[in-house]
Image: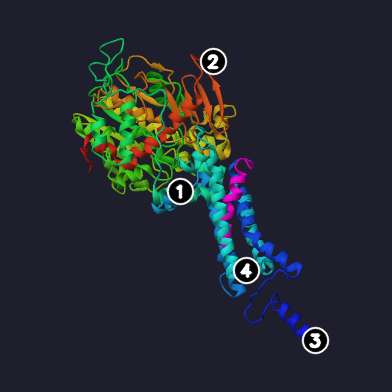
Amino acid sequence: MSDKINLNIGIERRSHFINSNDNNFTYYENNAPSHKKREIVLTLLYFPISILFMELVVKLSVGFSLVDGVLFTAIFSLVPACVLTVVSSIFKNGRINRLIACILTAVLAIWYSAQIVYNNVFGTFFVINSISRGGAGQALNSVDMIFTALKSRIFFILLMFLPLVFCIIFGKRLSMFNKSKISVKIILLCAAVVFQIIGMQSVNIDKSSSNTKSAYNLYHGELQQNAACEKFGLFTMQRLDISRMLFGYKSDIRKTESTEPSTTVSPATADTPDKKVKAQIIETDFDKLSEKTDNDDLKSLYDYFSSEKPSYTNEYTGIFKDYNIIFITAESFSQYAIDKDLTPTLYKMYNEGFQFENYYSPAWGVSTTDGEYANLTGLTPKSGVWSFSQSAEDNVSFPFTLGEQSRSNGYEQVRAYHNHTYDYYDRDKYLTNIGYDYSAVGKGLELGEDVWPNSDLKMMQKTVDDYINADSFSVYYMTVSGHGGYSYNTISQRNADLVKNLKYSDEVKGYLAANIELDKALEYLVERLEKAGKLDNTVICLTTDHYPYSLDEFNGLDELAGHKVDTVFERYKNAWLLWSGSMKEPVSVKTYCSSIDILPTLLNMLGFEYDSRTIIGTDVFGGKEPFVVFADRSWISQNGIYNANSGEYTAFENAAEKDDIDLLNNKCTNMFTVSRMILDSNVYAEIYGDTHIKGK
């Protein structure tokens, strides 16, 4: 009888850990066999290891440090790993659970792979906001570039699917995917919360740091896709993106010692050596505006504007007053495209106009449209969104853009053109929102051929007659002939004979050939202006949206420069052409400046009224200390350069003084924060009234 009882107890104990053929679930106790415990451990480690592995592959593929941020990445990766483990064990049927685990792994592999390809093409990661606005679909218009990126990153993409292969082959050995107790699920979910808390507490350790790349600033500050990905991992970066999209930002404008109250300064009483010099401001009672609002962001902005130093009138104030205006954002343009023989009109304009020898065109988060945003608004783009699209959607007022200023100053024709699809990046909305009558392919501009990319020359030939006979005109062009993918760029092929004897690679030859089309367009424009007798009273401004990043895959910039190009600063050094037929001699400008400085500089030259305190960029000639910021929060001052990635500061030779790095890091952070707040709050409408005139 005793033996029988003991036998029954043994059978009962074993029943706790043997599989049932009927329902494929298992209960595990502390006395489970060692191989079963190993299978449990393997199951618990599957998603943590898989996600961390994918994160490291992303870092490796885009050239990030595998060491920097690996601890944060590991901790934050445990959060989704715990959740996915629970999701993969919710059913009683083990086969269904294993299928769920495989599907989740496949989704992760596809998502991470897509980000690798996107980063290879555009130099950043796509975010949820871009997808919601159709960005992924519009990116597919660069399908040839995407296939090139797929080929170049195929090794990393294959690595990304190794966890899926493991799950398919060895999935049956992942025992917890059969069925786990509810208590185990609760423990895993609690563990996810604990890991999240540990991660956030670790982030908050350096809360007081001014370092723009500190964990705290990256986690809580303005979203920096690449830096956040390197520090925390792609999964966490995108979680931060979603959080900001749903709940907004915590605004934090930092005080800097360099700011002094300027509310008492008036254009007529500026305390300067020359009493004729006036502050470029519009007298505004910011204190009164602050008292009228309960919005904390608006209060912070009013305080910031009132304490900012203004720019001042100078020797170039009004030199182009009443001139016609032609502003050109040239796709992927660079100073290397300026050549006496290949592009003689570009060469003429640069060598006879203002020569900005230390001009930079930083690459922002959303490729071309962010470049346009910086050029046209004088603000840094908001991270994680299409800034111009948001401005149009929210009906944001930009009273100081050239479109709005031209209309308010009585220009007869205020037009914008683009030789690609009219609604690409929502240009039909945002160019209209800043005052232009807009035409593009599919909306009033027919170029007579279906090619990619379209011809800049044909766009010019089709549009000049719209405005050339007007008494005054202000025109904006966004070109496309210089678009990347030069081995299959139609315009590159069209001009191939003109570059065939150059000692460059085919891709670089294609780049130069594409820019020959831009030069032809400018040649035609200049000829028409001269024939109409309007060349001497028209100012032409030309710069780029971004450097030709599609050449990165082929080391094209190194080839054009004749040396290895520094990727933190030199990569973004570019040309800003500012020229009029009335100029008698060139003007050399050595001041450090960037794309956000174009608008205030032009406003001063055109004699338009504006408030220099409320634009983040600054008039190059207006007396303020130069300060160039980049998307990665590196910067250049008049005294030196700061590499935010390495934390290294290098003073210029013969610098007047050594910069206070903490102070200028705060200044850099403020420029991004205030730019974003201006967009989000529509503060210009609050200050000046919603007086902007919409284009047609």
Estimate how packed mark 1 is, as few (under 14), some (14 to 19) or many (20 or more) residues with alpha carbons within 10 Å: many
Q: Which numbered mark, 1 or 3, is in the foreground of this view?
A: 3
Q: Position of residue 458 (x, y in %)?
A: 34, 39
Q: Nearer the viewer, residue 412 or 441?
A: 412
> Along the polypeptide, which appears first: circle 3 or circle 2?
3
Residues drawn in magenta = 65-84
Residue 360 visible within the image: no
> Along the polypeptide, which appears first: circle 1 or circle 3?
3
Pointer 1: what residue? Answer: 241
Pointer 3: what residue? Answer: 2
The image's mark for residue 208 is none
The image's mark for residue 653 is 2
Pointer 4: what residue? Answer: 177
Q: Nearer the viewer, residue 591 or 538?
A: 591
Which residue shows up at 31% across the image and 17% down it? 316
> Along the polypeptide, which appears first: circle 2 or circle 1?
1
Q: Secondary structure at mark 4?
A: helix
